[in-house]
Image: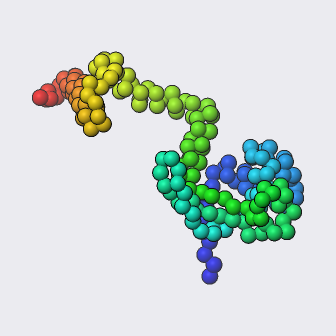
Amino acid sequence: MCQEELLMMSQRDRDRLRIIQQVSEGRLSQVDAAEQLGLTARHVRRLGKSLSFSGTRPYQRDNGKGIYRVYQCSSCQGCPLAAQCLRKDQRERRIYRDEYDAVRESRRAGTARLQTPAGQEAYRRRMAVAESPFGIIKNVMKLRQFLLRGIDKVRTEWRWAVTAFNLAKLVRFMKVLRAISARKGGVALE
């Protein structure tokens, strides 16, 4: 008995998949598909090729060490697109991905979402919710610079400021609760 698995996809992903399918069936040119997908024609050419995991490779950068996951195309030899896909000194296509690539892609997707009208509206709401505590701490509480030096001392000073902000917020909230309770004729909060 064959068991089917359901795959959830957004409408945008379904549209992209449909475009790629039209390219593979020859009903749409790679250039037109690239334009519709917002990619280069080179990327569209590569979409039909599969890359297999071939191992890991360590790397050293200024900010630390890490490990690349290496993927390579198994069908570069004899591929009619090899001249366009590979550099002159390459015999096969290799892609290196480190542990932070998923974060980078997520950040790029988030940046793209912010360019839409819905994203800009969400960002406007975020400014009111997330930025106002910083504005209050900076302007009302006059914490424009830290008095102490050293990360541990600064962290302690910041925690004191945030605690004071939260206590002031709690006092305002209790004031509202008392007013509501008094209007309803209930027991006053002590």
Q: Is residue 173 above or below residue 85?
A: above
| Percent x, y of residue 54 | 63, 69
Residue 147 figure quarter: top left
Instruction: Give the quarter of the image for residue 120.
Output: top right
181 relative position to 128: left or right = left
Quarter of the image that includes the N terminus: bottom right
Q: How far across and down, in percent of the image, does residue 161 sit?
A: 26, 28
Left or right of 63, for residue 89 = right
**Residue 71 image point, x, y percent:** 65, 64
Q: Is residue 69 visible?
A: yes
Along the line of sight, which residue is nearer the eye, 178 or 137?
137
For the C terminus, the image quarter is top left
Q: Quadrant of residue 164?
A: top left
Q: Is residue 94 left or right of residue 40?
A: left
Image: 43 above or below 178: below
Q: Residue at x 63, y 34 (%)?
A: 116
Count all numbered tags in the image, as a single digit. Answer: 0
Colouring mode (rainbow / by chain / secondary structure / one colour): rainbow
Pick the front one: 72 or 111: 72
Q: Nearer the viewer, residue 89 or 96?
A: 89
- Residue 71 lies left or right of residue 92; in this view the side is left
Q: Residue at x 14, y 27 (%)?
A: 188
Reply above or below: 46 against 130: below
Q: Position of residue 186 (x, y in %)?
A: 16, 28
Q: Which residue is depicted at the point 54% across and 61% down?
A: 58
Residue 169 seen in this snapshot: no
User: Residue at position x 62%, y 39% from top?
Assistant: 112
Residue that sits furthest to the left in the current view: 190
Farthest bottom residue in view: 1
